[in-house]
Image: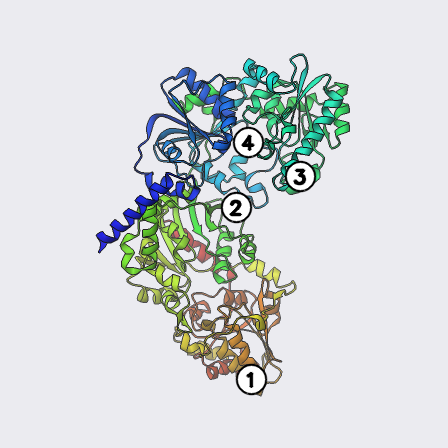
Amino acid sequence: MNKIVYKTFKQINKSMGKLVRETNNFKLISRMYATKYSKIKVRNDSFFYETRDGQNFSDSPLQIMKFLLARYPDFNHYIVYQNRYFEEVTLGLHINKIDYAQNPKIHLVERNTPEYVEAILFSKFLITDSTFQSFFVKKNDQIYLNTWHGTPLKTMGYAMPDGNFDSWNVLRNFLMTDYLVSPNRHTTEIFLKDYRLQDKYDGKILEIGYPRNDSLSSGQTTTHLRHFLEEQYAFSKNKLTLVYAPTWSPSDMYTKPSKVADTYINMYRQLNTALGDQYNILMKVHPFVYNRIKRIESIKKFVVNDGIDANELLAEADILVTDFSSIFFDFLNTNKPIVFFNEDAETYKKERGYYFPLESLPGPFFSKSADLIEYIKKGDFNEYSENYSIFKKKFVSLDDGKVTDKVVDLMLNGRFEKYSDNIITANKNEKKTALIYTGGMQNNGISAALINLVNHIDYTNYDVSLLTADNRNDDAFFNNFNKITDKVRVFVIRGESSYGWIKLFGKFFAENFAIFRFLYSQKQAKLNARRLLANQKFDIAIDFDSYVMNNGQWIAASEAEHTYNVLHNDMWLEANKKVDGRLKNSKTKKYLHFWNLFDTSLSVSEATRKINDIKLKKYINKSGVLTNIIDAEKIIQLSKKNVVYESLNIENLLEHVDKKNSSEITKATFGDVDISKRALSIHNSGSYKKATKFITNSRLSPEKNIDNLILAFVKLHSVYPSVELHIFGKDVGNYAPVLYDLVLSNQAENYIKFYGYSENPFPAIANADVFLLPSHTEGQSVALMEAMVLQKNIVASNILANIELLNGGDYGLLTIGNHPDQLLESLKIMADGKYKRLKNFDSQSHNKLVLHQFDKLFE
């Protein structure tokens, strides 16, 4: 049977392999990369270059290749191009007099083809000025040099709005590099802080200057380039040259190309009319913009081809006009004037932000073209000489014309002692490192527990990374994720997984059908984990969700000393729970069979651990406890604000589900109540406050036992007509209509009210007399702890987890069962004013215990 299945998948893979030879489809190329990853051996004589995703060949990688061609003629060089940008790539070579057609050591490789896959896999040295694609995983015996492409003026990485998600592939690439080139300390600090490299990056930041600036700092010019400019553009060798080099704006990406071009045409006309007698006017637009407008005929005489290296063009310039492009930092090497121009600087500042005020720039800033032209006409550029000197010293003092030589020496020969002053070490291995998978971050106790834990960790001793899917379009995910401290690093689950076709099909069948479980490839799962996590190693890795295998499996496959998954409930019960005859958590039941991939399974309470140890004995290796932490200070603060809730709109929900009593759907996990403690809290005199306002806050699903609470409350109201019940919580699985029908059928809608999900239910809880948690099962209720923090009187079912959390009845009244009459007995005690809480909950002591548990995970 196994051999037949294997041969079938192998034939499918072979067929798909033929297909990938005929297409450059990204998904198919990703599959091919994964299939060949371990089959293709690294060649020590090969260099692989990719700049601007193969849209040109320029920047520092071009300068490095030129140097290598001159010094090491036996190396092979593989240059990436996209088919539609072949002209730009070859122009860069032509201007630098590199005859790729006649040099057998130079190979042009089309991006996202089989040849591309093979070259990036067999090349020893990988060099880019941006990032490699999402399927890329650096091999251990490859050397990755990232030169990046500019000193930042605009905010970058995590300093940008949504930067923790949008920078996912940059972070991934940076962390995989062996060498990351930085032109100055400012850029180094941004790498460390705003790309979260501090305490995790194991490569070397080479704070050494930019190879691309060697020609600028040495005053070299390219005769070949000057001749090309004279032939192709309105360029005279008898004039000075003004280069206008703006960056791009988001509007450039969605405005019609002709409209974008009109902006540059208008600007050219103004500059050329006023300054054309004295200056050649050339525009070097951002590659994003150039690719949209390059075929428009009217711009071809002044917008230079993107294949021309920006720094080689700057060497021809006598004055630079720019806005927020980092190109101006490089131009400081020339000692020639810089003028800044942007018509909407304030909007740009609000949308993106700057690292330093515009007033400090090494040149004047204008928002009107007339003022810009008037300033250039005057020709007095000395006013900003002090700022210029400050910027030059701060940002380009390392550009000595020999940066390429130094970078190559480090890359090839590893002479670290020689350049020790230029090497920055980000990870001093002083902190314990943790990786945590967040799960779906929905409005539930699991998300609250995760947020509380991550926000209470001491980041002077721990370095924490989160693994998460990019679900920002989901409001609940977005709101909950934004509650997490910005001290964490975020790895985003995106891109094509590292599975070839045979392994991908095997993965699907293994995860969904027990008979095919042998097809699950841990080796391939580990490769995909390396892809997602940038080859990073951790002390511990935790799947904090454990309900769905889709992404939790990458935690088990991660390179961590210890791997854990967190069990938030009686997980056998959760996995086998049925509503309307269907499994409620079918994915959890499938995931059970893979929990043995984790070293240890952590329950959220000792009581829950005992249950899981018995029921999950054949599914888990070892067990432990990681209790939920609570943010008492925040709860108390929020309790003083206003309640805002989302109406359930029960009438708009789909047809409701199983009307069976919840006791038949979910079997309760009862424990023994300490009767003596219970008796101590009950006083027959009825001298304490008589409760009238009762509240519960939980998801509306069968295991929460709200139906029996409603039946009990109807009976309570018949004796105590002033009582009312407020039910907070979102509907799960269309169960709310069952509860609502129960209220209507008992004519209880005037005193039992539904409020839906609330982002902040704490004012309502604080205002209530009694908090209720009648659940059939809990792992460890965060909602119950929240009520304990607010020092509310509590009635909770006598299930094991509640008994433990309430310390046997110290912090609240435990029921004797959870059927209506059993719940009613406890409700009456509260309504009669007979209950007095024995102790108040000490959240600080509780959290100290949890953080100790967390620390023990590293042992």
| Quarter of the image that includes the N terminus | bottom left
Estimate how packed mark 3 is, as few (under 14), some (14 to 19) or many (20 or more) residues with alpha carbons within 10 Å.
some
Snapshot quadrant of residue 201: top left
Q: Residue 337, how many percent across, how many down?
A: 68, 21
Q: Does 181 appear above or below 777?
A: above
Q: Earlier in the sequence, mark 3 or mark 4?
A: 4
Camera-side mark, 2 or 4: 2
Q: Residue 90, how many percent across, how many down?
A: 49, 24
Amino acid type assigned to the residue bearing label 4 in the image? Thr
Estimate how packed mark 2 is, as few (under 14), some (14 to 19) or many (20 or more) residues with alpha carbons within 10 Å.
many
Q: Which of marks 4 and 1 is nearer the N terminus?
A: 4
Can I make out residue 440 in this image? yes
- How are the residues colored? rainbow
Q: What element carries label 1?
A: loop
Q: Which residue lies furthest to the bottom in this view?
A: 719
- Report how far apart the C-alphas of labels 1 and 3 lie in the structure: 60 Å
Estimate how packed mark 4 is, as few (under 14), some (14 to 19) or many (20 or more) residues with alpha carbons within 10 Å.
some
Between residue 74 and residue 93, name the one nearer to us. Answer: 93
Q: Residue at x 40, y 33 (%)?
A: 116
Q: What element carries label 4?
A: helix
Estimate how packed mark 1 is, as few (under 14), some (14 to 19) or many (20 or more) residues with alpha carbons within 10 Å.
few
Quickly name the residue at label 2: 165
Q: Is residue 660 left or right of residue 299?
A: left
Disc 3, disc 4: CB below 8 Å? Answer: no
Q: Which of marks 2 and 3 is nearer the N terminus?
A: 2
Quickly name the residue at label 3: 348
Q: Does 282 appear above or below 137?
A: above
Quickly name the residue at label 1: 746
Quickly name the residue at label 4: 187
Q: Residue 430, how many percent across, how many down?
A: 43, 40
Q: Which of marks 1 and 3 is nearer the N terminus?
A: 3
